[in-house]
């Protein structure tokens, strides 16, 4: 007898939280892709809540939230009871807990931590606007992909199957956002101990120090944490004592608003810091090489969901940060500014000829000004048309395409805006395609500073670079209209 699950091949158990529930890594034979499969016995008291959580989370259209692909009812067999199976896409990457452990719990830079949590908070704001919560957000719930994207696992579903720290799921998500920020800035977890522990090894993750019933402020662990971050964490987390006269935040939108204010006063990763960054990674690389030579350490693959770091299989290995080597030091040191042969405007969803059909790759916007985005004059700039709305009057954005002439190995792209900085997604390809989502993502950046550098953990080869602006900032001349203005673009890498 055939089963609705026949199209999926079960590869391995990821996690078995109780006798009624299991997490699997699987393979979709029809669509040729890996998936995560969560199963629950159909007569379990959580069944109705699981169906509702899966269906509601599938409504959210935000790439950062890993999608529910299907909900399947499996009939009972001679060897197994009836079950519900929830299918999610599988994302290759490392969870924040895995990344921090690979760094030996060394904290991230302040701007890096803020940037990651800002992305998570923005995605949760989108979800909460639809009355959808995560409920059990942990460092193991957030995946950094090979393209440096932030992706979130288990929206609504994990809270049903594994439990939430608070009955109020809004409070659970607020606690979690403050806890993520604390964890990335200090390398120590202030989150509920029973939820942070690995099912395999309950003593893996370092806990934040406490003073009585309260978690110590993050600045007591790391002196360079701005007071505003300490205050934000205390206002979002129940277990962190807040200063007298301040109130707890009531929504993730409030958290995002406060974090945005802080982020606007923290420099993004920028050119001025590159030499320091190279020294930092160079020293780490030399130490790693010495350890590898002396001790024979092996590279360890980390699982996405609640898996002991030393568990791995030959059939699938999630992305891990590359082990530093002497050759990687040389390649980093050899990075140089890559010349561009041309820059063209990119308006694939426009309809310049008015025929009712999107122009695709032929679509252009103020093409005559495109060359000003990379000329030597910092005062000149390419600027889009003026739009009534931030999404370019429902087009979904505009962009620029940089042509390097030949395929190059691209490591970073710096963009200087002539007005307010705006959200940016950088894609790479060997050909120009009209759908911005089809370009391989090098990195993304939120709206903010007028100059930002986007880097990828691994260089990406390609001839063309797409700068895609999905949300345009207010025009500096007409505040009721929106326009993006790009003054200068610098690409760094090496010949492919």
Image: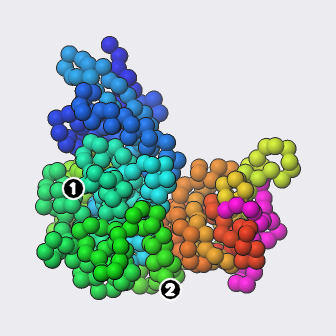
Whether the magenta-drawn stretch holds residue 437 is answered as no
Q: Position of residue 12 (x, y in %)?
A: 26, 38
Residue at 72% from the left image edge and 77% from the top image edge: 476
Whether residue 388 is in magenta: the answer is yes
Q: Does label 2 or label 1 sit earlier along the sequence?
A: 1
Real-space Cα separation, disc 2 to disc 1, in angstroms: 40 Å
Nearer-the-camera pick, 343 or 70: 70
- Position of residue 53 relative to residue 367, above or below, is above
> Viewed as shown, does residue 277 lie left or right of 223?
right
Toward the viewer: 285 or 211?
Answer: 211
Prevailing secondary structure of the magenta residues: loop
Other residues around mark 2 within 10 Å, as few (<14) / some (14–19) / many (≥20) = few
- Quadrant of image for the C terminus: bottom right
* Residue segment shown in magenta: 362-390
- The residue that appears at 38% across and 48% down in the rendered structure is 155
Quadrant in which residue 141 is drawn: bottom left
Compared with 210, 357 (above or below) is: above
Residue 379 can be seen, yes or no: yes
Question: Which element carries disc 1, helix, strand or loop?
Answer: helix
Q: Quadrant of residue 193?
A: bottom left
**Relative height, residue 196 to residue 41 (above, below):** below
Residue 119 appears at what percent x and percent y?
A: 46, 63
Quickly name the residue at label 1.
195
Task: Please name the residue shown 29% across and 86% down the image.
Answer: 223
The numbered mark at residue 272 is: 2
List x then y, in percent, for residue 393.
73, 56
Q: Outermost residue, top direction?
A: 1
State the quadrant of the N terminus: top left
């Amino acid at each position: 007898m055939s089963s609705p699950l026949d199209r999926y091949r079960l590869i391995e158990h990821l996690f078995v939280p109780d006798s009624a529930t299991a997490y699997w890594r699987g393979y979709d034979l029809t669509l040729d892709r890996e998936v995560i499969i969560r199963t629950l016995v159909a007569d379990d008291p959580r069944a109705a809540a699981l169906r509702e959580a899966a269906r509601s989370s599938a409504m959210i259209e935000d790439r950062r939230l890993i999608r529910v692909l299907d909900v399947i009812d499996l009939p009972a067999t001679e060897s197994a009871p009836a079950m519900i199976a929830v299918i999610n896409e599988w994302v290759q990457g490392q969870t924040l807990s895995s990344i921090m452990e690979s760094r030996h719990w060394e904290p991230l830079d302040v701007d890096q931590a803020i940037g990651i949590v800002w992305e998570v908070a923005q995605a949760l704001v989108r979800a909460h606007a639809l009355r959808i919560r995560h409920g059990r957000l942990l460092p193991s719930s957030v995946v950094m992909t090979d393209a440096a994207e932030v992706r979130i696992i288990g929206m609504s579903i994990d809270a049903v199957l594994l439990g939430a720290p608070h009955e109020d799921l809004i409070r659970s998500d607020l606690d979690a956002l403050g806890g993520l920020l604390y964890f990335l800035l200090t390398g120590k977890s202030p989150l509920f101990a029973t939820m942070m522990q690995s099912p395999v090894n309950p003593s893996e993750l370092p806990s934040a120090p406490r003073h009585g019933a309260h978690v110590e402020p993050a600045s007591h662990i790391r002196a360079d944490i701005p007071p505003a971050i300490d205050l934000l964490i205390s206002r979002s987390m129940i277990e962190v004592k807040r200063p007298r006269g301040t109130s707890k935040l009531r929504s993730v939108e409030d958290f995002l608003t406060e974090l945005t204010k802080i982020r606007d006063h923290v420099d993004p990763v920028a050119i001025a810091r590159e030499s320091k960054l190279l020294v930092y990674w160079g020293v780490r690389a030399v130490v790693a090489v010495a350890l590898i030579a002396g001790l024979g350490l092996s590279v360890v693959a980390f699982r996405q969901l609640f898996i002991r770091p030393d568990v791995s299989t030959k059939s699938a290995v999630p992305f891990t940060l590359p082990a530093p080597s002497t050759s990687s030091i040389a390649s980093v040191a050899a990075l140089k500014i890559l010349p561009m042969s041309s820059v063209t405007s990119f308006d694939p969803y426009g309809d310049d000829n008015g025929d009712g059909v999107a122009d695709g790759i032929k679509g252009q916007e103020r093409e005559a000004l495109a060359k000003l985005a990379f000329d030597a004059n910092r005062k000149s700039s390419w600027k889009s048309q003026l739009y009534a709305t931030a999404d370019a009057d429902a087009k979904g954005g505009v962009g620029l395409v940089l042509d390097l002439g030949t395929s190059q190995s691209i490591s970073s792209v710096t963009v200087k805006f002539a007005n307010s900085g705006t959200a940016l997604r950088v894609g790479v390809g060997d050909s120009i395609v009209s759908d911005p989502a089809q370009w391989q993502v090098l990195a993304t950046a939120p709206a903010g500073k007028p100059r930002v550098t986007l880097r990828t953990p691994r260089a990406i080869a390609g001839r063309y670079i797409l700068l895609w602006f999905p949300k345009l900032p207010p025009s500096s001349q007409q505040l009721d209209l929106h326009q993006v203005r790009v003054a200068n673009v610098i690409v760094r890498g090496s010949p492919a």
